[in-house]
Amino acid sequence: MINQQNMINRGVRRIMVGDHAVAEAVKMARVNVVSAYPITPQTLIVERLSEIIDRGELKADFIRVESEFAALASVYGASAAGARAFTATSSHGLFYMYEMLWWAAASRLPLVMAVVTRALGPPWNIHDEHTDLLAIRDSGWIIGMASSVQEAFDMTLTAFRISEDERVLLPVAVGLDGFVLSHTTEPIYIPYQEDVDAWLPPRNPKVPYVIEPGGEPVTLGNLPKSDLYHELHKAYMDESMGEAKRVITEAYNEYSKLTGRDYEPLIECYRCSDAKYLAVTMGAWSGDAEIAIDELRNEGYQVGLIRIRYIRPFPDDELLERINGVKGVIVFDRDYSMGFGGILAGELMGLVPSNVSFKGVVAGLAGVDVSPSEFQTIIRDFINNTEINGAMRVRRWWYIPNTNGGD
Amino acid sequence: MQMLISDTRELIILGRGGQGGVTAARIIVSAAAKDGKWGQAIPEFGAERRGAIVKSYARISSKPIISHSGVKKADVLLILSPNILSLVNINELMKGQDSVVIINSPTLIRTGYRTYWVDATGISEKLGLVMAGWHIVSTPMLGAFVRITGLVTLDSVISSIREFIGSGEYVKLNIEAVKMGYSMVKGD
């Protein structure tokens, strides 16, 4: 199952846009500090949170800051002081945080940040693509990407559990597609607050360490010897990323008992058991790809869909298990690395043996719509081509739909 | 090509910025949820501003909706301003000959499709439903939509209005507008 909305659900059914679902999850996580600077299409999250705090529904400090750099710096400070903290941003705002992203991750402080994905200027554009979120992939943040409004809620709530786990202690970024989820209204199930409280107790402020007046002295951001930097800090941090896979799995197992929504933790696979070909997607357009898979199955193509839920930690073993034995893999990227191609395609290609057909497709930048029938055509062409001509090895192919230069 | 689950119905609302098209799509989804169905309301963002033509979409289904791409062809097209017809080629927006047009107009306008009309502006004027200088026509249109399509119930629309639109007298007027739209819609 790619989409879990029809599972047995425990909770209250409400309709909301993706941004408000994130704000609702942050409220239910009982965060202590929210700090953010507005940027479209993220703005609805912090607007809603400021209303919630103003009404007294959440006892938290809302810090209005002068920039995204300060937004992340202030929640970083709040986390170092033992608070549960949250921020949210998009696109240029995320890039303005860039230095702080690395500080927050390598300081091993638990934090949650929503990234409402958006294109990067110039030229100026507010619409959806994943390039911004994926540009932080080397920094030490755990990175998830939701595919529905419900999942944006669920992923935000679970992020606190994952980030604060002693085996992890890394910040978590929750991605959701700008407008496509952030401003789209869908029915979702909100769990009961008492269930959430039992599942997510208040953060232990002493883990990993607390900086407080009169507290135990802690040294942070000092100048260790290079061997310590290499061995202790970085290798250990990477090890914690590995541990995070186990923690993510545990978190969703427990969450499913709470909510009835049973996500596969790192990747989900749709109609994969007998698939000879696999398509790979991430984010909200996965549902459109899933419809294409059904149509292709009706045409007789043995094809399945992998949806990536977490790209960091990189789900290599999980992907390998699925890729093993197939004849071809086609990866759809709503993002790019200039001079390279789609980012997911580049990361996955190393897992695909050279005798297996491979194609990376860059599509849908800046919110350009990709319909189920377009997915269907692209995947069908890939399979037919492979069946006739043998395995291809195309890392980057730009899909340019016929839009007459836009509307 | 029928791509979606068979009972999924797709809507396009064409209005002008300020007429309440985006809210109308959300109210329809809210009503669908109250009726035990699934739905999705998608505003088309980018050029929204007062007076400009604004498109918004909705889907209603008995099953969860997994698609997130825009609605390209409508089963039901709601037109909030009659003069939009002279600016938009609706043939590009209609799914087929069974598709329905519901239009804000005091008189019949032939579109080549099954067309229904209701004088939403007249209803809005009569009730004094004005917000920031604009007549709210979306609520009478919602009433007409319920009557013609039966996709959501009138009760669910009315209780959703209470959640979406302000409070007090203004809510009462909008509910009245829904009821008038429901009873006054006509078909060719």
Image (cartoon, rainbow, N blue to C red):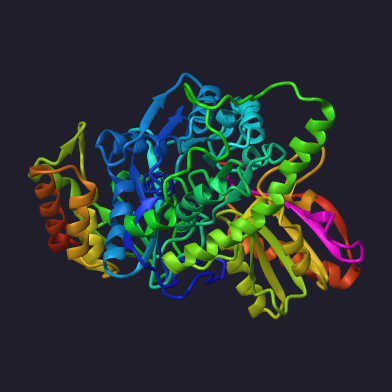
- Residue A386 visible in the displayed image: yes
Residues drawn in magenta: A348-368
Which residue is depicted at the point 13% across and 53% down?
A: B175
* A246 horizontally vs B41: left or right: right
- Residue A401 visible in the displayed image: no
* A324 horizontally vs B106: left or right: right
Which residue is depicted at the point 51% across and 51% down?
A: A161
Farthest residue, direction top? A66
* A401 horizontally vs A262: left or right: right
The answer to whether residue B93 is above or below residue A70 is: below
The answer to whether residue A341 is above or below residue A372 is: above
Using the image as rendered, state which of residue A380 and residue B32 is in the foreground.
Answer: B32
* B102 horizontally vs A246: left or right: left
Using the image as rendered, state which of residue A236 and residue A170 is in the foreground.
Answer: A236
**x, y percentage for residue A148?**
49, 57
For the C terminus of chain A, give its image quadrant.
top right
Which residue is depicted at the point 31% across and 37% down?
A: A59
A284 falls in the magenta region: no
The answer to whether residue A147 is above or below residue B168 is: below
Which residue is depicted at the point 19% across and 64% down?
A: B154
